[in-house]
Image (tube, rainbow, N blue to C red):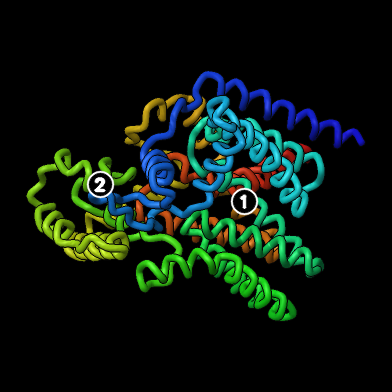
């Protein structure tokens, strides 16, 4: 019972810090892609990012789940007050549940005291707390990712009930229409499960089938519009954004949206790209054709200057796992932001070696492999500070293993 009280106290502390951060630092309006998608939907009831002379192009540029989340809150507000207040309320709620999920995940490997310590660190970690004040899918992403890993570990054990299979499928489907990179995590997770436990083959197959069934309406919608079955049509642009001669770790700073053509960089090396973009036929395939052009351009850049982009790739790996030494993001270099990232990024490394050496638990190996997979995959594109959320919970967990190791040595 005493530990229940401690966890409740941790949740209270978590909510308190998030309320303070949101009060002082919250975004006051929609911006960038979300604003464009929102405005177009309200004008034409169309989920569209590009509009040409009143022709709304069906979009798959941004996976739709966070848009649904935003619009759901807009409906709940009944136009009586700014719906962003509801968005922040639900983000705090999801983030608080995420603390509980992380605590339960830690309990798979650590005793109650260390799991509570992990929950406390997780609940007040500056990057996680600050993410609640952003109009960004990152808080929802963290909640769904932790839900997936919690259910996956439960599924990995003895719980193969119909309810567990459905919940795992539902969360997987939600992740897939929230973040494109989750497809790699999902496929790897199923593959790892089958390789390490052949008895899970049937239930794994059912999970994949239900997940595909749940996302099939969106895939069918995209196929009808473009003749290509896909979830997102931004991977080519993301690849180019992180791999062109102006790109740094955070990628290319501008969005090459047609309506902003007059402010596109007047770069000679972009001239061929601009011509190709101007020649794209305006129809429902506009986004996918555009994305293919960017993908081809990025691949050409990488092949022509392998050394430059190899060095940049290493920098992105470092920035994703630790910090970006040359970030242009406002207040990125704040000690409250940088020091925790450095400390837990650094402690996680010996924590990994200690854990893998002493434990042969397949679930630990799985966490390590997913963290490495995410790091290598995300660094192919570009790295923004909030992207680190995907592996931060793993770094905290491995740091807990290191802390436990140090304490055991000190006691001796």
Compared with residue 381, is residue 206 higher up or lower down, i.e. above or below? below
**Secondary element type, mark 2:** loop
x%, y% of residue 24?
Answer: 52, 19
**Dot 1 alpha-carbon crowd within 10 angstroms: few under 14, some 14 to 19, many 20 or more:** many
Q: Which residue extends farthest right?
A: 1
Q: Is residue 306 left or right of residue 124?
A: left
| Lower sequence index among marks 2 and 1 | 1
**Would residue 409 be visible to someone looking at this image?**
no
Other residues around mark 2 within 10 Å, as few (<14) / some (14–19) / many (≥20):
few
Q: Which mark is residue 144?
A: 1
Residue on which disc 2 sits: 257
When asked about the image quadrant of residue 93, the answer is top right
Residue at (22, 58) in percent of width and height: 307
Residue drawn 23% across and 65% down?
Answer: 296
What separation in Å lies between label 2 and label 1 (alpha carbons)?
30 Å
Q: Is residue 288 left or right of residue 126?
A: left
Q: Which quadrant of the structure image shows residue 115?
A: top right
Q: Nearer the viewer, residue 20 or 67?
A: 67
Work out whether residue 302 or residue 205 is closer to the camera in this orientation and state it: 205
Name the residue: 53% across, 44% down: 389
């Amino acid at each position: 019972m005493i530990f229940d009280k401690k966890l409740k106290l941790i949740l209270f502390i978590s909510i308190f810090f998030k309320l303070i951060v949101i009060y002082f630092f919250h975004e006051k309006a929609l911006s960038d892609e979300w604003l464009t998608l929102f405005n177009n939907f309200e004008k034409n009831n169309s989920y569209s990012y590009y509009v040409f002379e009143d022709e709304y192009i069906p979009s798959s540029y941004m996976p739709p789940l966070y848009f649904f989340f935003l619009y759901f809150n807009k409906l709940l507000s009944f136009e009586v007050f700014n719906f962003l207040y509801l968005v922040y309320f639900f983000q705090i709620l999801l983030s608080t549940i995420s603390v509980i999920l992380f605590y339960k995940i830690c309990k798979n490997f650590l005793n109650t005291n260390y799991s509570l310590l992990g929950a406390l660190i997780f609940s007040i970690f500056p990057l996680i707390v600050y993410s609640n004040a952003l109009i960004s899918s990152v808080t929802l992403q963290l909640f769904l990712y932790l839900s997936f890993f919690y259910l996956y570990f439960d599924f990995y054990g003895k719980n193969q009930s119909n309810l567990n299979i459905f919940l795992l499928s539902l969360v997987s489907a939600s992740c897939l229409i929230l973040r494109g990179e989750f497809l790699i995590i999902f496929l790897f997770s199923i593959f790892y499960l089958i390789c390490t436990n052949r008895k899970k083959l049937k239930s794994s197959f059912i999970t994949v089938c239900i997940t595909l069934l749940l996302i099939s309406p969106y895939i069918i919608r995209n196929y009808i519009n473009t003749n290509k079955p896909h979830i997102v049509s931004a991977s080519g642009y993301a690849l180019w954004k992180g791999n062109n001669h102006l790109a740094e770790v955070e990628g290319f700073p501008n969005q090459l949206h047609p309506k902003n053509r007059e402010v596109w960089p007047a770069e000679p090396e972009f001239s061929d790209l601009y011509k190709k973009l101007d020649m794209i036929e305006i129809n429902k395939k506009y986004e996918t054709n555009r994305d293919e052009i960017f993908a081809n351009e990025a691949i050409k850049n990488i092949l022509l200057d392998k050394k430059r982009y190899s060095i940049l790739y290493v920098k992105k790996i470092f920035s994703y796992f630790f910090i970006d030494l040359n970030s242009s993001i406002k207040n990125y270099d704040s000690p409250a932001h940088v020091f925790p990232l450095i400390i837990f990024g650094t402690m996680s490394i010996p924590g990994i070696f200690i854990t893998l050496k002493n434990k042969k638990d397949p679930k630990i190996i799985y966490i390590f492999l997913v963290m490495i997979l995410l790091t290598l995959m995300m660094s192919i594109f570009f790295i923004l500070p909030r992207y680190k959320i995907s592996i931060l919970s793993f770094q905290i967990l491995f740091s807990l293993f290191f802390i436990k190791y140090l304490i055991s040595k000190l006691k001796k």
